[in-house]
Amino acid sequence: MPAVVWNPLDEKVSVRMKGSWFEFKPDQKKIMDDHMGMFITEHRKEDGLIVLPADFYNNETEMFNAEYANSVEGKAILAKFREQAINNVVNHHRYIIKNLQVSLKRDLSTAGEAHVNPLIYASDGEIRSMEIVAKYNKLKQDATQKKVDKAEDLLKKID
């Protein structure tokens, strides 16, 4: 059975899988070979791609099942998978940042330069990782603030 691969992120994802390059636009869903789906699940989670459950594939039309995706259950599953994808991306980039901090700090200490801030040696990729983590942390804070504001408004209406 084919796999429905989804990019739930708000930016383009380019990924090399089994010798070929694939590009996923924001919120794009592609029907792919199930072997590619398994490859993404096992090896490319950090890119933010998600393989959706079989319910999102329509066997009759051999296309994405938009009707199921727009159902209450489908929307809840998509929201859960979007959060999972973002967590996968953020955890990967946090690992890169932590590696920068720990390994460079140790290297500087060994070289007798323990007083030097290891962040001055951060590469462009490590800086990009910091930007990605900061971006998603800000989105999470904004979502939390919206919940708080809504709860406060509801409490005012109750009183």
Image (cartoon, rainbow, N blue to C red):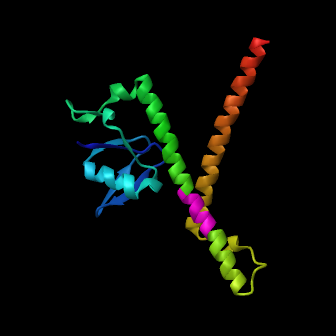
The answer to whether residue 157 is above or below residue 13 is above
Say which quarter of the image contains residue 106: bottom right
Q: Which residues are magenta?
A: 92-99
- Measured along the vertical axis of the image, is residue 129 above or below residue 141? below
Seen as rendered, the residue at the extreme left is 60
Query: Residue placed at 29% from the left, 62% from the top?
Result: 18
Relative to 94, residue 156 above or below:
above
Q: Position of residue 140 (x, y in %)?
A: 63, 41
Judged by its main secondary structure, the magenta piece is helix
- Location of residue 93 by image quarter: bottom right
Res 123 quadrant in image: bottom right
User: Observer-nearest residue: 12 or 41?
Assistant: 41
Whether residue 10 appears in this view of the structure is no
Q: Total label count?
A: 0
Magenta span includes 96? yes
**Quadrant holding the C terminus:** top right
- Residue at 74 percent of width and 73 percent of height: 117
Q: Split into 4 quadrants, where in the image is the N terminus? A: top left
Q: Position of residue 77 (x, y in %)?
A: 44, 33
- Can residue 45 be seen? yes
The image position of residue 37, as x and y in percent, is 32, 49
> Residue 18 or 53: which is nearer the viewer?
53
Residue sitting at x 40%, y 25%:
70
Spot the residue most to the bottom: 111
